[in-house]
Image (tube, rainbow, N blue to C red):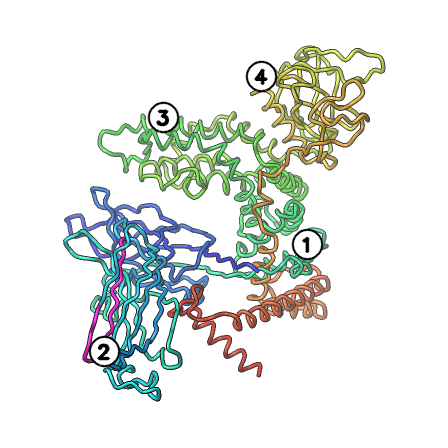
Amino acid sequence: MASFLLAPVRRGEAKNLPSYPGPNKMRDCYCTVNLDQEEVFRTKIVEKSLCPFYGEDFYCEIPRRFRQLAFYIFDRDVFRRASIIGKVAIQKEDLPKYHNRDTWFQLQHVDADSEVQGKVHLELRLNEVITDTGIVCHKLATRILECQGLPIVNGQCDPYATVTLAGPYRSEAKKTKVKKKTNNPQFDEVFYFEVTRPSSYSRKSHFDFEEEDVDKLEIRVDLWNASNLKFGDEFLGELRVPLQVLRQSSSHKAWYFLQPRDNGSKNLKPGDLGSLRLNVVYTEDHVFSSDSYSPLRDLLLKSADVEPVSASAAHVLGEVCREKQEAAIPLVRLFLHYGRVVPFISAIASAEVQRTQDPNTIFRGNSLTSKCIDETMKLAGMQYLHVTLKPTIEEICQSHKPCEIDPVKLKDGESLESNMETLRQYVDRVFNVITKSGVSCPTVMCDIFFSLREAAAKRFQDDLDVRYTAVSSFIFLRFFAPAILSPNLFQLTPHHTDPQTSRTLTLISKTIQTLGSLSKSKSASFKESYMATFYEFFNEQKYADAVKNFLDLISSSGRRDPKSVEQPLLLKEGFMIKRAQGRKRFGMKNFKKRWFRLTNHEFTYQRNKGDPPLCSIPIENILAVEPLEEESFKMKNMFQVIQPERALYIQANNCVEAKAWIDVLTKVSQCNQKRLTVYHPSAYLNGHWLCCRASSDTATGCSPCTSGLPANIQLDIDGDRETERIYSLFNSYMSKLEKMQEACGSRSVYDGPEQEEYSTFIIDDPQETYKTLRQVIAGVGALEQEHAQYKRDKFKRTKYGSQEHPIGDKSFQSYIRQQSEVSTHSM
């Protein structure tokens, strides 16, 4: 069983930050997200504001144990130096209190005590020492073994420890050696302290020391960073251990969390630093072996086949979750892992289209369909996004040319006409790389777009543009436009762009979004008059044609009827050399130069451009398109188009052309139902395949075909973990599942106006939905029992004070209390 931690974090805004002491008063602020003190995310800089709005979402999988989730607000001065204004720290055990809730937190001061982290391995041993004169002394041996995870101060950590035996009338301190350049120091030093007055030795008094003395004594360990600064060494944390721990045994060995000093930060007023609004979602999953999830997983995976789809387990999850995205993330990952994402999204999209009354509002809401497609594009389309946009975005960032077209915001010395021309060139470049990227669009996305297009065209037959707007609302509005607007969130840039570049990208994103929308009144779609003026550059028909051609390509599929009313779309053409296919029994298998032409319906060749086709291969007959090894014909840049009865061998003019043809042919035929999974990388010559030496010309291929999904996407997803996440969601919304059952019963027996609490659920078939709900609740119940048993076993075997659960671990203390209450209740 493995544990996984997830923390989607949505930061909203800060308010009432202290003003800057200079004449300007305003600040340039950014926010960081930290696990303990380790920065894992940084927002953009909001300039000249004491109430900065960030509005950025951050999602991370937490790869290690942590004590707190911290948010720091930094101010950047005119010299680009950053200073901390304050922070919000949420202890791990307190995260459930704020789960998925918008909360305002007061910013706290940052000092040494607020930055304490790390743990210490300590051993105490009470020894009886007999002197030469027979005098008995009791001495305490204090051994500092090691520390882990100490904070790094000003880029370095040279720690040492002081060990103090403290009581009402004594304080004796000793010090370890300094360990250079490590925040995980290995000390392994022992210090001795006398803890009782010497007394005459007698066997009867073996370890019989004065308890009132010991009750008032404690060992205090302080960790410090040895600093060369004139302000002295920095405090890293402390721990206090009363010697009462030695009452039951003469030795004690345990791990301790470091703590702040008792008086740390008490004199500082938190209210004068402002506040920060956060919405934090924190979940911790325990994943069992695959067999445990079979019933629930199988129920989810057959969702696409359930009629109606609203009665399926996956759709039910979307109905009960507070936010559709909660359900979409694990569902899409699970379906991608098992190759079922296209049929599921096709089914829910078709159902949503049937419920839509106005074609102008198709897929505009935050429905389960929209969120699932968003998540699929995010997972399957990231490489496509990088290949398409990254070079152009990087060039825009590096050139750093002004593109402000709002007359009010123009800086001194800038020309509106020059800025407008620069922006127009940028928009043209981005538009061109997008509309020419159709061949690179991942197959899984093309399949989904094909189903959206078909469902929308069938539902709104009088609207000729709906087949385009159904697809453009995703590929432009939800995929390309957000990536241009915030490239760092899509790993197109390593950091947030500077304000000027960010403004340029905002203007480009707005224009591309409008171009992709194909709206009839485009200038009216802008609130700003300067944007409407700028858009006049793009009112030419060629832009609309390019968008439609692009949308046609990415929503094409070999499953379509070639005799569709849609006109064939030319994808690529040019001269290449082909080898005779052997269609004639006694014909020579020679090589000839031919003009090849590919549309989304067929692949043809003729003697010259414009001649009648000599051969036509329907797209649905292309079973695979793969490179051909050079040894076959001693010719470079060859590839093969594999058909049911034979392969067509073709030589392109160069390696670039060969790859381009392979890519476009693969893309347009990738959805064919009879596509091969294996092929022969060499030709069949002289009675055998050159690659595997098999003698039959119909022998099964010996190498795997090119995959349709981006590399490793199926390997990177853990299906069991996603099923566990879905179980957790179902379990947390159990009351809604039960309410949905009641709604099914109500609709089955009563046809009148339904209760308001039931009206939020989509229930097309009450009986089928009720049956699914019963299976879901049973599957969730079985997993809940398995989790309960795991927790009982964990409670029995876990030791408080171990390296995994040091003393001072409040989250574990809370866990112990809960398990004790459960055990008492069970008894």
**Mark 1, residue position:** 303
**Mark 3, residue position:** 421
**Mark 2, residue position:** 167
Contact (Cβ within 8 Å) of mark 4 with mark 2: no
Secondary structure beneath dot 1 equals helix
Q: Quadrant of residue 429?
A: top left
Q: CA distance from mark 1 to mark 3?
A: 52 Å
- Horizontal placement of 223 versus 578: left or right? left
Foreground mark, 4 or 3, reads 4
Residue sitting at 68 percent across and 70 percent down?
Answer: 746
Q: Amino acid at mark 3?
A: Glu
Q: Amino acid at mark 2?
A: Gly
Which callout, 2 or 3, points at the residue further toward the start of the chain? 2
**Mark 4, residue position:** 654
- Residue 755, position as x, y percentages in the image: 61, 70
Above-or-below relation of 107 to 229: below
Q: Amino acid at mark 4?
A: Asn
Q: Does residue 560 appear in this view?
A: no
Residue segment shown in magenta? 158-173
In what quadrant of the picture does the C terminus appear?
A: bottom right
- Residue 361, position as x, y percentages in the image: 55, 47
Q: CA distance from mark 2 to mark 3?
A: 78 Å
Q: Nearer the viewer, residue 759 or 601?
A: 601
Which callout, 4 or 3, points at the residue further toward the start of the chain? 3
Q: Is residue 166 found inside the magenta-colored segment of the image? A: yes
Contact (Cβ within 8 Å) of mark 2 with mark 3: no
